[in-house]
Image (tube, rainbow, N blue to C red):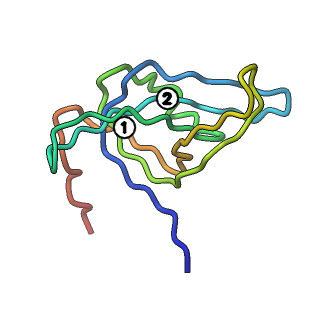
Amino acid sequence: MDFNLVVLGGHLAAPPELRVFESGSRLLRFLVTVKSDEPLRRVDVLPVTLWDPEDELVAQDPQPGHRMWLVGRVQRRFWDGQDGRRSRIEIVATNVTLRDPDLLFPSPVEA
């Protein structure tokens, strides 16, 4: 069985871009930086898309540096460009949560 699940915790790298289509569908695109120390210290900047984001998320107007968590899947898109066939790997999010920049883990859920 194949399994395509991505869970990321990182920071917003640039202001998000919201596109609204004639159909009424909305697409929120943003870049998330994810730092890692093992095996080598590095920072990856990952493109993320979220279809039809909740109004609450859009209204929060997240800015670069804001901590975010997201769940989604990896997808490779293809298109024809001036240089020929092109592709890009991106994260297609199904859930995005903004977090307090100083909070690493969420507070426990009260029963």
User: Would you say the residues marked 1 and 2 are in contact, meaning their CB atoms lie under 8 Å apart?
Assistant: no
Q: Is residue 91 left or right of residue 109?
A: right
| Residue kind at label 2, given as amino acid type | Phe
Mark 1 or mark 2: which is in front? 2
**Residue 56 placement (x, y as % from top left):** 51, 34
What residue do we see at 21% from left, 59% from top?
108
Q: Is residue 27 left or right of residue 45?
A: right
Q: Is residue 87 above or below residue 16?
A: below
**Residue 15 placement (x, y as % from top left):** 45, 18
What residue do we see at 58% from left, 34% from top?
55
* Viewer-nearest residue: 94 or 99: 94
| Residue kind at label 1, given as amino acid type | Leu
The answer to which image quadrant residue 40 occupies is top left
Q: Residue furthest bottom?
A: 1
**How far, Cα to Cα, is label 1 from label 2?**
13 Å
> What quarter of the picture does the N terminus occupy?
bottom right
Of the image marks 1 and 2, the number of the one nearer the N terminus: 2
Task: Report the residue marked by disc 1.
Answer: 98
Q: Residue furthest front?
A: 83
Q: Is residue 61 above or below residue 48?
A: above
For mark 2, give the secondary structure: strand
What residue do we see at 49% from left, 34% from top?
47
Q: Residues within 10 Å of mark 2 (few under 14, many from 20)?
A: some
Q: Residues within 10 Å of mark 1 (few under 14, many from 20)?
A: some
* Viewer-nearest residue: 4 or 52: 4
Task: Report the residue marked by disc 2.
Answer: 30
